[in-house]
Amino acid sequence: MPKPVIISCAITGSIHTPTMSDYLPVTPDQIAEQAIDAAKAGAAILHLHAREPETGRPTGDINTFRQFLPRIKQETDAVVNITTGGGHNMTVEQRMQPPLDLQPEMCSLNMGSMNFALYPLVDRYKTWKHDWEPGYLAGTRDFIFKNTFKDIEMILEQIGEGCSTRFEYECYDVGHLYNLAHMLDRKLVKPPLFVQTIFGVLGGIGPDLENLQFMRHTANKLFGNNYEWSVLAAGRHQMSMGITCANMGGNVRVGLEDSLYIAKGEFAKSNAEQVTKLTRLLKEMSLEIATPDQARERLALKGAENVSF
């Protein structure tokens, strides 16, 4: 029998800017409300970034995180997963500060440096809600998202070992899978691994079915039965590739961080709307939805009572 599908929901991220959708949560109240509703709709894991309330710009400010995390913890039993990716132009040390302080059950961890390109989005808009937006996006034309082996080792040691936090290992290309296998060989990471294969970000692997199958085949070869597989597909590929992954025995991530739409040309009005659509599609395929406690057991998490918020 297939295992219940673990649904992750990435609530706001650092890719999309406020001009792109009126429904993108920006303030702590908006982030909390959308996260709580996504959990009620079936998300077992909530992946969270913070934004400056006045401008919507991504921020690593711990006090901003503390304005929404306790409420999410009080009103849901979902697993809280905090970014170590932060936002563009943050140093690795800045990106690490929120999880070091908050000690969540999970964090994201990008498994390699890459060109993380958002600059083509600039040409889609003629006016902007905030002055920072076009420069933030255009700057990615000459930007490398830095995640060296030294950086990864530091995050694993200080957040993983130091805070008993486990990771969503974000793999944007096949080489990232081999980087993770290298860390496994060195015993710097421990199974079960939560491997998030990501498709459709410019600078990473493309959103093709052949690529999805190849990434799955490679992960099976490298990790055997010691991992949980999940798929994050950007933009219009979100649902189709996620459903394909679930049919192949994997898990799925959705959310406004990854796609602003619920259907072609139709904005998603909330993260919960995407989660609700996904749960319906999964149930129509006779697949069960994992609870947060099932996700905790399968991913060997420390439990919500052991976080620092």
Image (spheres, rainbow, N blue to C red):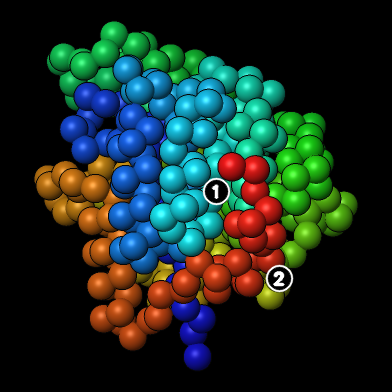
Q: Which residue is mark 2?
A: 226
Disc number placed over residue 108 in the picture, else none: none
Q: What residue is at 44 percent from the left and 45 percent from the top?
A: 71
For residue 214, say whether it is visible: no
Q: What residue is at 51 percent from the left and 34 percent from the top?
A: 66
Q: x%, y% of residue 137?
A: 37, 20
In the figure, is residue 13 to the left or right of 304? left
Residue situated in front as seen by the camera: 140 or 72: 72
Q: Residues within 10 Å of mark 2 (few under 14, many from 20)?
A: some
Residue furthest to the bottom in view is: 1
The quarter of the picture where the C terminus appears is top right
In the figure, is residue 195 to the left or right of 290? right
Q: Where 288 sits versus 145, above or below?
A: below
Residue type (three-letter) at the residue carrying disc 1 = Asn
Q: Earlier in the sequence, mark 2 or mark 1?
A: 1
Separation of disc 2 and disc 1 at Cα? Answer: 21 Å
Residue situated in front as seen by the camera: 65 or 114: 65
Residue furthest to the right in view is: 186
Residue furthest to the left in view is: 265
Q: Quadrant of residue 254?
A: bottom left
Q: Where 59 sits versus 239, above or below?
A: above
Q: Secondary structure at mark 2?
A: loop
Q: x%, y% of residue 183?
A: 79, 50
Residue type (three-letter) at the residue carrying disc 2 = Asn
Q: What residue is at 56 percent from the left and 34 percent from the top?
A: 85
Q: Which residue is mark 1?
A: 81
Q: Secondary structure at mark 1?
A: strand
Residue furthest to the top in view is: 131
For residue 57, say whether it is visible: yes
Asked whether disc 2 touches disc 1, contact meaning CB atoms under 8 Å apart, the reply is no
Q: Quadrant of residue 263?
A: bottom left
Q: What residue is at 18 percent from the left and 21 percent from the top?
A: 125
